[in-house]
Image: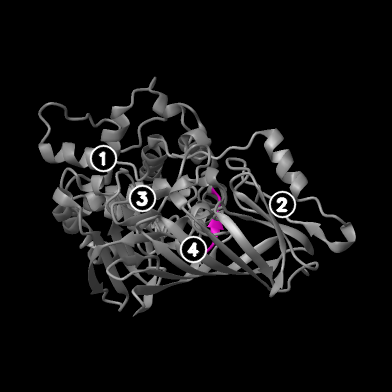
């Protein structure tokens, strides 16, 4: 995984870039939103409400041309502000007037409008740009994956820098219109609902709309040749799945898994409450990576997720993120347990539903896999640090914490928590500490010590009762049990 860290001298240089020429003309927005894991992520001084992206992409050359219109509101009088972006910019306009701009390094675009932007008064920012996303490297790494017939933007904690200018942090969520023109015979897949499709002069334009707040890393774009399937949920939501035409031997297993999206989502509504968005689906491009990602309304799955056969469990994981991670997003990246612990636990609940091992049995199995001296227990899911943000312990120890909470509170209260949390924080952001406070309030039980033990102490807690006395079956255990364990240790990052 990419880790974007800025050393103090580099951060100081960015801060200098943001110093206003005159205090009377307002102040400059900070070049970072304040996340200690990723100091350069996001920006201060404004909130984005909407992104309108009008793009043209040539698969043969990887050339992406775009015009981004960003609607935002300053949170203070602004003399200057930053966007996170890496491609070449040819023009910037703010409220229709030409603005000065300068690049700092590979990912900061500093913009100076013609006049001070007043706090609370909405502004429009238009950025014209072009470049080859696969050639943009940050710390030697790219979030844009080239495929035999196109390209894909899907990564965490960031991918927007490679294809559109943004305030690139989950704290600043917005709605999206993504319009993409590609050569006839090629398709463009993005988030939400396909509003229209039209062809002219050898090019086909696809217009997608995601109408609920969406974090920048959850915006996705896939260009290539896909086989499309469509469905509708019982509530009338459109379901669109896309499979690259050249998936080879993984094609059948991918379809056998992702075509159950509607079924899985309808089951999850019983666990987490009403589905929060305007569309469902998933897509499998022909990429070489091995991870999956909860891109909003339309999760990304790499073909390798299905190399060993059908993998409905990963579909459960990514769809669970639509509630835990997408609708309720992290306040800062240290709060990643809010995403991954709950998505992993949803896989255990699915196994319980399918009769392939209860959540308690899977908790016992996972707990026994890691003896007390295993480094697994030194990772703190509640604040793992940037190097361990996607460590297996965030997923598995995080899910163990939830099973322990279920045992402590009982099923009625526990499942009320699972359903109430995404309703209370819908389309917003939250910290781990917010969940602790919420769980205490709803359950009427002091839980600070409990969560400290399971999420913050670098040591092995006592086994979550009532499974403490259970022993893990070894050589004689059935093959189905081993398959469950293997499925539930596949991470959705790579």
Which one is closest to the eye, mark 3 or mark 2?
3
- Looking at the image, is mark 2 or mark 4 earlier in the sequence? 2
Which one is closest to the eye, mark 1 or mark 3?
3
Which one is closest to the eye, mark 1 or mark 4?
4
Where does the image place residue 109, in percent across and percent down from the top left?
65, 54
Q: Which residues are magenta?
A: 427-431
Q: Vertically, is 261 above or below 3?
A: below
Q: Vertically, is 309 above or below 189?
A: above
The residue indicated by pointer 1 is: 362
Give 47 or 246, whichever is nearer the viewer: 246
Residue at 47% in and 65% down: 423
Q: Vertically, is 116 above or below 218?
A: below
Mark 3 falls on what kind of element? strand
Q: Residues within 10 Å of mark 2 (few under 14, many from 20)?
A: many
Q: How far apart in space, not on screen, are marks 2 and 1 (Cα)?
A: 45 Å
Q: How far apart in space, not on screen, are marks 2 and 4 (Cα)?
A: 28 Å
Q: How far apart in space, not on screen, are marks 3 and 4 (Cα)?
A: 16 Å
The residue indicated by pointer 3 is: 146
Q: Main secondary structure of the magenta part?
A: loop
Q: Residues within 10 Å of mark 4 (few under 14, many from 20)?
A: many
- Whether tag 1 and tag 3 are in contact, CB under 8 A, the answer is no
The residue indicated by pointer 4 is: 65
């Amino acid at each position: 995984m990419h880790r974007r860290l800025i050393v103090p001298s580099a951060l100081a240089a960015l801060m200098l870039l943001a110093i206003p020429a005159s205090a009377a003309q307002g102040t400059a927005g900070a070049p970072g939103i304040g996340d200690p894991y990723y100091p350069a992520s996001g920006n201060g001084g404004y909130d984005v409400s909407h992104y309108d992206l009008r793009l043209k992409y040539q698969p043969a050359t990887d050339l992406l041309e775009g015009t981004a219109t960003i609607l935002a509101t300053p949170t203070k009088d602004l003399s200057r502000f930053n966007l996170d972006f890496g491609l070449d910019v040819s023009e910037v306009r703010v409220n229709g007037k030409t603005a000065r701009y300068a690049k700092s390094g590979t990912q900061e675009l500093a913009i100076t409008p013609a006049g001070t932007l007043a706090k609370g008064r909405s502004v429009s920012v238009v950025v014209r740009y072009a470049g080859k996303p696969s050639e943009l490297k940050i710390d030697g790494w790219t979030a844009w994956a080239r495929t035999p017939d196109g390209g894909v933007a899907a990564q965490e904690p960031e991918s927007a820098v490679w294809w559109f200018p943004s305030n690139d942090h989950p704290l600043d969520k917005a709605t999206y219109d993504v319009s993409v023109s590609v050569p006839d015979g090629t398709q463009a897949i993005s988030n939400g609902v396909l509003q229209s499709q039209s062809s002219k002069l050898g090019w086909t334009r696809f217009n997608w709309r995601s109408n609920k707040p969406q974090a920048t890393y959850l915006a996705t774009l896939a260009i290539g040749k896909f086989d499309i399937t469509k469905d509708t949920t019982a509530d009338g939501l459109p379901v669109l799945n896309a499979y690259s035409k050249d998936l080879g031997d993984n094609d059948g297993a991918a379809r056998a898994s992702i075509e159950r999206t509607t079924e899985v989502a309808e089951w999850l509504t019983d666990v987490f409450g009403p589905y929060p968005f305007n569309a469902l689906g998933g897509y499998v491009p022909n990429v070489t990576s091995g991870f999956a990602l909860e891109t909003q309304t339309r999760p990304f799955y790499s073909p390798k997720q299905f190399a060993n056969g059908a993998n409905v469990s990963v579909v459960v994981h990514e769809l669970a993120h639509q509630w835990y991670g997408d609708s309720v997003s992290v306040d800062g990246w240290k709060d990643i347990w809010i995403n991954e612990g709950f998505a992993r636990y949803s896989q255990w609940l699915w196994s319980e539903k399918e009769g392939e091992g209860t959540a308690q049995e899977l908790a016992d199995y996972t707990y026994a896999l890691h003896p007390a001296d295993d480094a697994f227990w030194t990772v703190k899911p509640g604040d793992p640090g940037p190097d361990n943000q996607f460590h297996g312990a965030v997923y598995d120890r995080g899910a163990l914490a939830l099973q322990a909470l279920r045992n402590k509170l009982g099923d009625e209260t526990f499942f009320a928590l699972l359903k109430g949390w995404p309703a209370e924080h819908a389309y917003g952001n939250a910290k781990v500490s917010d969940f602790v406070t919420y769980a205490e309030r709803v359950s009427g039980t002091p839980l600070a010590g409990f969560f400290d033990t399971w999420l913050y102490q670098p040591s092995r807690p006592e086994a979550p009762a009532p499974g403490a006395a259970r022993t893990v079956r070894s050589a004689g255990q059935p093959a189905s049990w081993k398959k469950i364990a293997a499925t539930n240790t596949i991470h959705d990052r790579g």
